[in-house]
Image (spheres, rainbow, N blue to C red):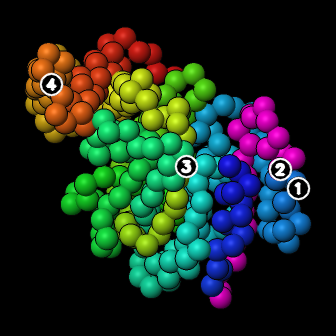
């Protein structure tokens, strides 16, 4: 997968006036990441760097890359992604054309197995399938999503202002927390940063078969709830609460549980709707566990 990522970074057109360096952060892997990167350095003509980060976790890796690089813009993708040939050019034009502090774009799925019939489009973010539409949109209250760190470019000046990614909210080898991107997104907005969703800032994200299972979706939603509870401790919502949990989560979980029972005892005509109903319960269960039982690092 890393070689395919590097191929896409190498093949994309670099517009005049933009200088690009690529840094691969090896997050304490046990495979041939170092050898793979070193074997490709000649292809990049001195523009490819290798960095080892021993602390396991996505946030640690992102922070190490940010600190080790010096470009005016910091672009971030994952090693199971490939950028569109126009990715650099679109980013360059966005930052050159108007006052922008960060940009993001869609993740188009590269399916490693057929999409299951039960996979809810409402929960597509679980597997990194993100599509904010076909129009440029400003991030903020009117945008139905957040800036996702697997397809993000943030100005270094703004990163120096808001700080690095939270290491207590990020995914590790032992926990499937998923709050570091949302935390960064809100800190950017709180700092007055202007961000744009660009429909043509495209990455292609490989979806492995092991993530196309109901077990993975249940676990991911549970840990997203845990992450939301962690953020809620210092960034509470403006909604009504009941026993420390947003009241609407009780309603969504109860309705989801009732619909799940209905689908379980009757013929399932819409497996996507049926499983989406169940996942609402796992969202609630994760939040409740995160609020009262999980100890955040």
In this picture, is 279 found above or below 6? above
Q: Earlier in the sequence, mark 2 or mark 3?
A: 2
The mark found on residue 206 in the picture is 3
Q: CA distance from mark 1 to mark 2?
A: 5 Å
Q: Earlier in the sequence, mark 1 or mark 3?
A: 1
Q: Residue 103's x, y, as percent?
A: 44, 66
Q: Is residue 33 magenta?
A: yes
Question: Do tag 2 and tag 3 residues touch (Cβ < 8 Å)?
Answer: no
**Taking 29 as reference, is 229 left or right?**
left
Front residue (pair 35, 250): 35
Q: CA distance from mark 1 to mark 3?
A: 23 Å
The residue located at (58%, 54%) in the rendering is: 81
> What secondary structure is found at the residue carrying circle 4?
loop
Circle 1 sits on which residue? 39
The residue located at (37%, 11%) in the rendering is: 293
Q: Earlier in the sequence, mark 4 or mark 3?
A: 3
The residue located at (41%, 50%) in the rendering is: 129
In this picture, is 114 found above or below 132? above
Q: Earlier in the sequence, mark 4 or mark 2?
A: 2
Magenta residues (range): 16-36
Mark 3 is surrounded, within 10 Å at the Cα level, by few (under 14), some (14 to 19) or many (20 or more) other residues, namely many
Q: Residue 218's x, y, as percent?
A: 37, 25
**Taking 115 as reference, is 176 left or right?**
right
Question: Do tag 1 and tag 2 residues touch (Cβ < 8 Å)?
Answer: yes
Dividing the picture into quarters, in which one does residue 172 lie? Answer: top right
Question: Do tag 4 and tag 3 residues touch (Cβ < 8 Å)?
Answer: no
Circle 4 sits on which residue? 267
Circle 2 sits on which residue? 36
Mark 1 is surrounded, within 10 Å at the Cα level, by few (under 14), some (14 to 19) or many (20 or more) other residues, namely few
Dividing the picture into quarters, in which one does residue 283 lie? Answer: top left
């Amino acid at each position: 997968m890393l070689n395919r990522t590097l191929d896409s970074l190498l093949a994309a057109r670099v517009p005049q006036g933009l200088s690009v360096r690529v840094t691969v952060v090896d997050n304490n892997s046990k495979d041939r990441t170092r050898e793979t990167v070193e074997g490709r350095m000649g292809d990049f003509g001195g523009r490819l760097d290798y960095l080892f980060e021993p602390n396991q976790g996505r946030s640690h890796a992102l922070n190490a890359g940010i600190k080790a690089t010096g470009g005016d813009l910091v672009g971030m993708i994952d090693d199971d992604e490939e950028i569109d040939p126009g990715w650099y050019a679109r980013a360059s034009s966005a930052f050159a054309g108007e006052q922008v502090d960060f940009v993001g774009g869609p993740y188009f799925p590269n399916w490693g197995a057929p999409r299951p019939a039960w996979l809810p489009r409402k929960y597509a973010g679980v597997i990194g399938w993100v599509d904010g539409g076909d129009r440029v949109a400003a991030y903020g209250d009117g945008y139905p999503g957040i800036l996702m760190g697997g397809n993000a470019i943030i100005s270094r000046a703004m990163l120096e202002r808001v700080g690095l990614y939270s290491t207590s909210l990020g995914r590790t080898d032992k926990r499937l927390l998923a709050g570091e991107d949302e935390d960064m997104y809100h800190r950017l907005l709180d700092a007055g940063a202007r961000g744009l969703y660009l429909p043509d800032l495209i990455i292609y994200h490989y979806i492995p078969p092991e993530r196309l299972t109901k077990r993975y979706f249940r676990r991911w939603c549970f840990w997203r709830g845990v992450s939301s509870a962690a953020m809620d401790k210092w960034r509470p919502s403006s909604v009504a609460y009941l026993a420390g949990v947003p009241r609407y989560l009780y309603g969504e979980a109860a309705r989801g549980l009732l619909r799940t029972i209905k689908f379980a005892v009757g013929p399932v005509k819409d497996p996507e709707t049926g499983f989406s109903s169940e996942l609402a319960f796992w969202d609630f269960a994760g939040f409740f566990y995160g609020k009262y039982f999980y100890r955040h690092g």
